[in-house]
Structures are given as structure tokens and as C-alpha cells.
Image (tube, rainbow, N blue to C red):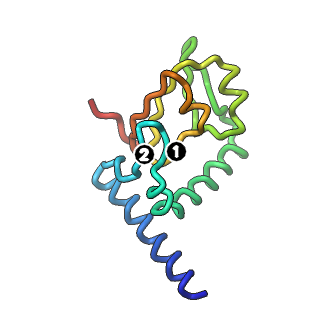
């Protein structure tokens, strides 16, 4: 049992060290997100402690926040948070035909990746995309 705990502690340390390096070096590519919007399987093995913690935090935020998952900022232009599979009806009801995914650390849900005009530009939080 202690070897499993040791492995979890080591994996968690590596995960947060890699997250720290990604932000310190400003390298969103360290999250290994593919241009399709999916995370690499290796990314899940490395970052699972970080992903679990973030998923819980985002879930709590979505439950207790009064913010909408999607907001129309000008006609036919929406900004949204990290959507989940349960947001499928909301997303499709808006008639969205193009998506710009700026998340670096999360894989995108399948219904968003399936849009013909999907573009993934991984950007770290608090950073702007580069040219």
C-alpha cells in the first residue's frame, strides 16, 4: 500500500512541477494538447492530479456561480467557460458554427471538436496569444 501512496506523491509532485514550468517558461505546449483539442494520453498520465483538482474547482464554480456557461457579447459571437458534455443542448441551441479554443490544460468536449470550423490555440491563463 505504501508503494501506491509513494507513486501518487511522486506523480503529484511531477504534475505540479510541470504546471509550474509551463507557466514560468510560458510554454503551453508542455500540457501536450493536440490541435484537435484533445489532450495527449501522456498528458493525462502526467497531469491527472492537476486535472482532477481543476475539474473539482471548475465544477464547484459552475454549481455556485451565477455566471452563464455561454454569453453573447455581440450578435452571433459568444464567450464561454470550459463546457462539459451536459452543455451540449445549450451549445447546439445557439447555432454556433465556429469555435476558438484557447485552453491549454484541458481537452475539449467532443461536440465542440466536431465543429467544422474548430481552431485550438493553447494559451495559458492570464496570457495573450502570440502572433
Which residue is label 1 attached to? 107
Position of the N terminus, as image quadrant, is bottom right
Which disc is residue 33 wearing? 2
Name the residue nearer the viewer: 78 or 1: 1
Name the residue nearer the viewer: 20 or 96: 96
Where is residue 27? Give x, y as percent.
31, 49
Where is residue 37? Give x, y as percent.
48, 39
Seen in the image, is 119 located left or right of residue 74? Answer: left
Residue placed farthest to the top in the image?
A: 75
* Residue 112 occupies quadrant: top right
**Helix, strand or loop at disc 2?**
loop
**Label 1 crowding class (10 Å Cα cut-off): few <14, some 14-19, many 20+?**
many
Seen in the image, is 101 located left or right of residue 24? Answer: right
Where is residue 104? Give x, y as percent.
43, 44
* Residue 110 occupies quadrant: top right
Q: Residue at x 48, y 70 (%)?
A: 12
* Residue 66 occupies quadrant: top right
Seen in the image, is 28 located left or right of residue 102? Answer: left
Where is residue 40? Give x, y as percent.
45, 51
User: Mark 1 near mark 2, Cβ–Cβ under 8 Å?
Assistant: yes
Relative vertical location of residue 89 with respect to residue 58 in this rendering, above or below: above
Relative vertical location of residue 29 with respect to residue 69 in this rendering, above or below: below
Q: Residue at x 56, y 29 (%)?
A: 114
Pick whichever of labels 1 and 2 is earlier in the sequence: 2
Distance (Cα) linking label 1 and label 2: 7 Å
Q: Residue at x 60, y 53 (%)?
A: 55
Relative vertical location of residue 51 with respect to residue 70 in this rendering, above or below: below
**Helix, strand or loop at disc 1?**
loop
Position of the C terminus, as image quadrant, is top left
Amino acid at each position: 500500500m505504501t508503494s501506491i501512496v509513494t507513486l501518487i506523491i511522486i506523480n503529484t509532485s511531477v504534475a505540479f512541477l510541470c504546471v509550474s514550468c509551463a507557466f514560468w517558461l510560458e510554454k503551453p505546449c508542455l500540457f501536450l494538447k493536440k490541435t484537435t483539442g484533445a489532450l495527449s494520453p501522456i498528458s493525462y498520465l502526467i497531469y491527472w492530479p492537476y486535472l482532477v483538482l481543476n475539474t473539482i474547482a471548475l465544477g464547484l464554480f459552475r454549481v455556485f456561480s451565477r455566471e452563464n456557461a455561454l454569453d453573447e457579447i455581440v450578435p452571433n459571437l459568444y464567450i464561454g467557460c470550459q463546457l462539459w458534455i451536459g452543455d451540449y443542448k445549450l451549445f447546439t441551441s445557439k447555432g454556433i458554427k465556429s469555435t476558438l479554443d484557447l485552453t491549454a490544460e484541458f481537452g475539449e468536449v467532443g461536440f465542440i471538436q466536431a465543429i467544422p470550423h474548430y481552431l485550438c490555440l493553447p494559451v495559458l491563463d492570464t496570457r495573450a496569444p502570440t502572433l
